[in-house]
Amino acid sequence: MSSFTLFLLLFLAAARACQNGKNILFLIADDGGFEAGVYNNTAIQSPNIDALGQMSTIFDHAYTSVSSCSPSRSAILTGLPTHQNGMYGLEHSVHHFQSFEGVHSLPMILHSAHYRTGIIGKKHVAPMDVYPFDYSKTEFDDPGMSRQFGRNITLIKELTQEFLSQCKNDSRPIFLYIGFRDPHRCGGSVGEFCEIWGSGGEHGDIPDWKPLHYDPEKVKVPFNVPDTPIARQDLANQYTSISRLDQGIGLVVKEFETAGLLNNTLIVYFSDNGIPFPAAKTNLYEPGMGEPMFVYSPEAKNRGHHSQALVSSVDLLPTALDWAGVHYPSYSLNGKHVNLTGMSLLPILDEKNPSDRDTVFASHQCHEVTMYYPMRVIHQKNYKLIYNIAGNLTYPIAGDLYGSPSNQKLLNRMKSSQSLNWYKTYNQYSYRGQWELFNLEDDPQEAHNLANSPDHADLLQSMQAVLKKWQEETNDPWLVKYTHE
Amino acid sequence: MSSFTLFLLLFLAAARACQNGKNILFLIADDGGFEAGVYNNTAIQSPNIDALGQMSTIFDHAYTSVSSCSPSRSAILTGLPTHQNGMYGLEHSVHHFQSFEGVHSLPMILHSAHYRTGIIGKKHVAPMDVYPFDYSKTEFDDPGMSRQFGRNITLIKELTQEFLSQCKNDSRPIFLYIGFRDPHRCGGSVGEFCEIWGSGGEHGDIPDWKPLHYDPEKVKVPFNVPDTPIARQDLANQYTSISRLDQGIGLVVKEFETAGLLNNTLIVYFSDNGIPFPAAKTNLYEPGMGEPMFVYSPEAKNRGHHSQALVSSVDLLPTALDWAGVHYPSYSLNGKHVNLTGMSLLPILDEKNPSDRDTVFASHQCHEVTMYYPMRVIHQKNYKLIYNIAGNLTYPIAGDLYGSPSNQKLLNRMKSSQSLNWYKTYNQYSYRGQWELFNLEDDPQEAHNLANSPDHADLLQSMQAVLKKWQEETNDPWLVKYTHE
C-alpha cells in the first residue's frame, strides 16, 4: 500500500465521523459581485461558482446589511447590523473597530451547541472573544501569511483537508468559514487588482490555479463603471482574480464531496460587499448593496433555480441556526435586549417566490475611520430610501478605490473638465443630501432622486416611519434627537 | 492600647515603607475648570484646591490635548494625542472606543519599572491590557459602585488608606491615580449637576462632605455661558459639586501628609476637559482646551507661583517618567514608530517664564460615537488655528450638555427668536467652516475668525505648515489626501 493510498484511507475514515451531524460551510468572497455565468454574465468563465449555484437556490435579490468589509463580516457572523453589533468600520490598523464584548456570534453559539468550528483565510472581525474558532488560519494567527491563507487556493485546499481530517478524533458536526481574499484589490492605496500574484515564475506559484485572461474589449462593463480602455483593463484584471476565487471554491466543494459530506452540509456562498468600483463598495446603491448569494441545502428539492425573494446577510445566522436546530440566546447589549431581525431562509429555498417579506434594510457608519458617512437604508418593494445622516459631508472614497485605475481616470477627466462618460456628475456623486428616494423599477441606476417630489411625499413619509421603527428595533445609537439636525 | 491607636501605629509603619521611593499622585477632576481662588475666582470657596496650588507651580496656560473625557484620560496616561493612541472617543456603552493594543501607558511603564500602581474612581479608558493597575477600584471593577468610587470622598479617603497600607508589605514606590467624578453632570441626557447626591437624608450621606451652597446672584458667569437666572442656578449647583471635589482633594493630600509622603511624592492636579457648558467641553476654544494644572514637586524651590509657560496634558507622562527616572520604551504602532511630543515639566517648575516653547497642539475626533467632528489645533504664541476637518458638518452637542438647563435655555430662546444674550449667534456656533484663526490677545473670546483675512494669509499658511508637521510626527490617520476635500 503506497503512503498516498494510506493517507486517502485514513482521510476517508476520518471524514466519515463528520457524516452524521448537520455541517455548515460558508464561502465568502471579498469584494465579489455578479461576475458569474449564473448571474447572466457571459463574458466571464466561472464554472465552479456556476456549478455550486446549480446545486443551490440562487438569490437574485440578496443584499448585504452593510457594504464594507469588517462591518459586513460582523453582520454575517452575528446576524446583527453593524450599528447593533458595534463593528462600525474596518477592524485593522488605525481604524480599529470592534464588536461589543457581549455579542453572541455564530461560531460562539455553534461551539456551545457542540460544533467544531474553523476559519480559513480572511477574518477581519474582532475582538477574539466574540469571534472564537476552534481551528483558525487567519491574519490573526500569522500576519505574514494573510495573503497566502486568503488567495493561495492550493493552501486553502490543504487547510480544508487538515480541518476535515480532525473529524477522525472528533464526532462533533462542523462549521467551516472560508474567507477568500479574491477579487479584492491588492492593497490600501495601490488600487490594482491582484491578478499577477501567484501566477507563476517570479510571482510565485499556486499549483491549482490556472489563471484565465480576458480581452478588455470583451468584458461586461457595469453601468456604474465609466467605459474607458483603462476601466476595461481594470475589469479584465478583476476577472482574472475571480478565476482564482472560482477555482478555490471548486477545490473546497470537491473536498467536501470527497469526504462524503455533501449530503449533510449546508453551503452558503456570499460576498461581503460591492465590487471595488465607484457607486459600489462602501455605497448602498444597488451595486454596493446587492450581492451574489447561493444557499445549498441537501434537503431542498429544487436545484439551481433563481429566487426573487428579498433577503439579507443578517438572514444567514438564523438560517445556519435553523439548520443546526439551535436557538439564539436571550441577552442584552448596553442595557438593551437583542432581537434578531433576520429570518431563516430554509423554508423558502424550494419555492420560486415564497417569501412575503417585502422589505430589507441596511446601514453604514465608517469604512476607514476617517470615512464617517452614516447611512440608513430601507428597500421596500420597488423603492429604496437612503437616509444620509450626515448628508452635508462630501462622500468619502476608500483608499483602494481612490487609487484604482478606474477612479483615477474619473478624477483626471473631472479635473481637466472632460466629459466623464458616466451616469452621474462627480458632484452629484459626492454631494448627496440627507434623503435619497429611488424607484428601482423605473430607475435601476438610482440616478433620479424623488425625495423632494410632491408626488412621493406620502411614500417618503411612510418609508421614513418604517425605517425609524427598524432603527428602534435594532437599538440604533444614531437614533438621537440632538445631533445632525 | 486602644484598637484605634494600634491601627494608627500599624498604618504609620506601613506607610513608612513608601517613604524612600519617588512616588507619584495624579488627581484628575471631571469636567473641572478654573473655579478656584488660585485662578482668581473670588465667588467660590476652594480652600483645599487653593492649598494644593500654594504648594505647587500653578500653570495659567495649561491645555488639554483633547476636550473629551476618555480621549483626554488616554492622552494623560499615554502621553500620546487621541488620534495617535487610538482612543478616538468615549470608551463606554455604544461609543466603545479603545486605545490600540500596542500602546505603552504610564501605569504599564511604571509597573515594569517596579512601581506599585493604583487607580481609584473614574477610569474610562480601555482596553485593560493597555491600562493595567495593580490596585483598582473603578467602574470596571464594580459598575454599580462607579458613582461611589468617584464622588463619595469618604470612601475615596478610605480606599487611599487601603492602598497606602499595602506599603507595609511592598517596598516599591507608588503611582496612585484618583479620578474624581466631580463636577461632571449627573448623567447622559439629564444634564443636571450632581450636587444633591450624598448631601444627607434621603440623598445618602458622605460623612466627610460639607456641601457649600451659593447664591446664584453671586456666581461668576464665564463669557461662554449666557447670563440668565437658569444658567446662574446651574453654575451655583456646579460650585456645590466642586465643594465635594475640593474637600476630596484635601482628604487625599492629608492622607499622603499623614503617611509622611509629601517629601517624596510628585503631585499633579488636572482636569480632563472643559466645563460642561457651551463652547467648552468637547470644544477646542479656550474654555474647552484650557484647564487648571498644578504640579507639586518636593524638590522645587518656589511654591504657589503662576507659570506662564504653554504646557499640555501630553507633558504629564514625560514629567512623571522624568521624576521616576524611567525611560520611555522604543516601539511602533500600526507600523509607525511612536515619538513622544510632550516634555517634562520638572525643569520649568521653579522659574516664572522658563520655557522657550511657544506652541501647543490639540486634536479631537468624536465624543459620543455619533458626534464625529474631527479637529486639529495649533496654539502658537497669541494665535490659535482650528482645522475643522469635516467643517461642513453641524457642530454636535453632547447629550449631557444638550439636556443641561443652560443649553435648553439657549435653544428655547433661539427657537422663539429671542435674543440669546450670548457672544455668538447659535448659527455661528453650529457652522464653523474648515479653518478658524483667532488672535487670542485681541479677541480672547475667539469671536472673530481671521482665516479669510488677507492680512493674516502668511500667518495662516505658516501655522498650517507647522500643524501638518505635527500631524505627521504623531502619525495622524486623518492626514489623508483623498477624503474631506
Image (cartoon, coloured by chain):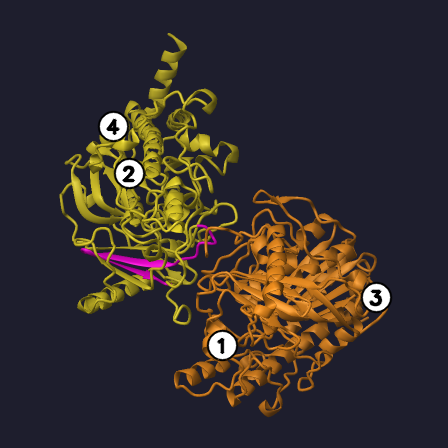
Chain colours: A orange, B yellow
User: Which disc is residue B268 wearing?
Assistant: 2
Front of the two marks 2 and 4: 4
Indicate left or right for B56 with A168 as reference: left
Q: Which residue is mark 4?
A: B47
The residue at which mark 1 appears reads as: A191
Q: Are marks 1 and 4 in contact (CB under 8 Å)?
A: no
Tell me whether the residue at label 1 lies in contact with that at label 3, contact meaning CB atoms closer than 8 angstroms.
no
Q: Residue at x 79, y 68 (%)?
A: A353
The CA span between labels 1 and 3 is 41 Å
Q: 10 Å neighbourhood of mark 4: few (<14), some, or many (≥20)?
A: some
Q: Amino acid at mark 2?
A: Val
Task: Name the foreground residue: B145 vs A169.
Answer: B145
**In the displayed structure, does residue B180 sit left or right of residue A389?**
left
Please give the residue where the numbered disc 3 appears in the rendered image: A300
Find the magenta span and give its range.
B368-389
Question: What amino acid does circle 4 point to?
Answer: Pro
Label 3 – label 2 distance at C-alpha: 69 Å
Closer to us: B38 or B320? B38
